[in-house]
Amino acid sequence: MEVKELLFNLPPIIGLLPLIIYIILSFKKNTHPVVNVFVCVLLGAVIVKQPILKLGAVISDALGSFMALIGFIIILGSGLGEVLNKAGVAENLVHILMDKIGINTERKAIIGTMITSVLLVTLLGTMAGANAIIAPIVIPLIATMGITPSTLAVIFQGAGQTGLFIGPFSPPMVTLMELTGLSYGKILLYAGLPVSVCMWVVTYFIARHTQKQTFGKYEFDIEVKEEDEKYVATTEEKRATTVFLFTFLVLIIYGVAVKSGASYAIFIMITVAIFTGLAAGMKIGEIVDSMFEGMSKLIWLFAMFILFEPFLMFVEGSGAFDALFDILQPLIVNSGQTVFALLTSLIGIFGINGAAVAQAMLMDSLFSNMVSELGVHMGLWAAVLLIGSQITSFAYPGGDMLGAMGLAQSKDVKSMLKLGYSIIFTLLIIIIILSIIL
């Protein structure tokens, strides 16, 4: 978006005001997330002198954005979950996992969900798509363990996103290899694994803490049945479960083989829902109605994703991110490797906003000359680029954070920000350590 002249010729840094207000509103009790973001959209529009009467056209454009795509994938995941519930697949899978694998405690549920999320994101190369697929499966399971939506949201973002940091064909890894000239193995050694391991540890402990804080306060919008006798799946439920797993695995393998992106998740969920429903004896009309019933539960989130596009666009259009960079740049020019790495990471996390791959490329274009002048180790620079471009989603509510919350049926932004800033603090320490040893 082209930088605009602000209202009353205010300095560009004022463009950060809607973002700051949104974060403040996120901590307020009894506020609705959609209302919060809409208020900040209006404020952003006023600051950049966007005509309010033309705001409808801006929102219309947002319907074709990547944010809207992510939102649609998420509500489709909820629709698939409803089909799995009606077909008896979700309940059958719960018993298979509990009886055969033994996921029967909070700790095992948290670790098992983390592993599942990481593996699927690694395979698919998309966090939103992968978590949307597994959410309908894990929610019935962990609900029986007493895990709360807040805890699941922490797991989905904290653990799930690391799948992008270790997959050989994921967008972040391909971008880092291109920018640094390092091989996949070296990127993994210097950046992918150190960052991921730290995030796994932090996520696990924050998830345990969140569980203690939110147990009994929030619960999933599903029925958790108390059983007096041993569960026995019907023939239709067994058949539907087999068809679901077979269809799911075939489509996943194909998606990995052809390196499909986030949009492929739409095809997976619709196809799996149809085949599973038919195998359970449901009519096509029943399957469609069940999909819409599940999707309707998260329509608020879809609206929120659409509004987030102009919200962030107005902040970027104000020139606030560029102004923040100009303020911090003098601190970097004459610094050593450690200070340079720390400050550029902070600028990437808080000062540059946009698609993660674009952020990495922008950071490299801004600081590559300084990297050469200071003799910064390429392994360290890879870690800085990864953290600076990917961890922005933990700094304040955005697509990834909201997506994880939506899939987990959570509206608890506070817990997500606790996770985010715990991860940021830990990764900045990792950057300091790497800058010393490399």
Image (tube, rainbow, N blue to C red):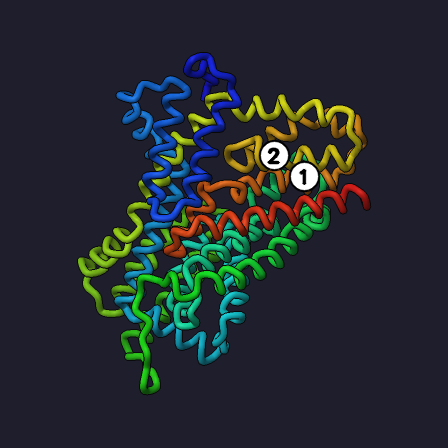
Which quarter of the image is occupied by the N terminus? top left
Residue at left offset 57%, top offset 57%: 203
Which quarter of the image is occupied by the C terminus? top right
Q: Which mark is residue 269?
A: none
Amino acid, disc 1: Val
Question: Is 151 left, or right, of 288 in this rendering?
Answer: right
Q: Is residue 121 above or below residue 211?
A: above
Residue at left offset 31%, top offset 59%: 273
Residue sitting farthest toward the front: 29
The residue singled out by tag 1 in the image is 384
The x, y position of residue 359, in whole percent, is 57, 33
Tag 1 and tag 2, C-beta contact below 8 Å: yes
The x, y position of residue 150, in whole percent, is 44, 57
Amino acid, disc 2: Gly
The residue singled out by tag 2 in the image is 348
Residue sitting farthest toward the bottom: 229
User: SS class of the residue under badge 1?
Assistant: helix
- Give the mark nearest the N terminus, 1 or 2: 2
Within 10 Å of disc 2 (Cα), the crowding (few <14, some 14-19, many 20+) is: many
Question: Is 278 left, or right, of 395 in this rendering?
Answer: left
Mark 1 → mark 2, Cα distance in angstroms: 8 Å
Residue at left offset 40%, top offset 45%: 28
> Quarter of the image holding residue 178?
top right
Q: Is residue 258 visible?
A: no
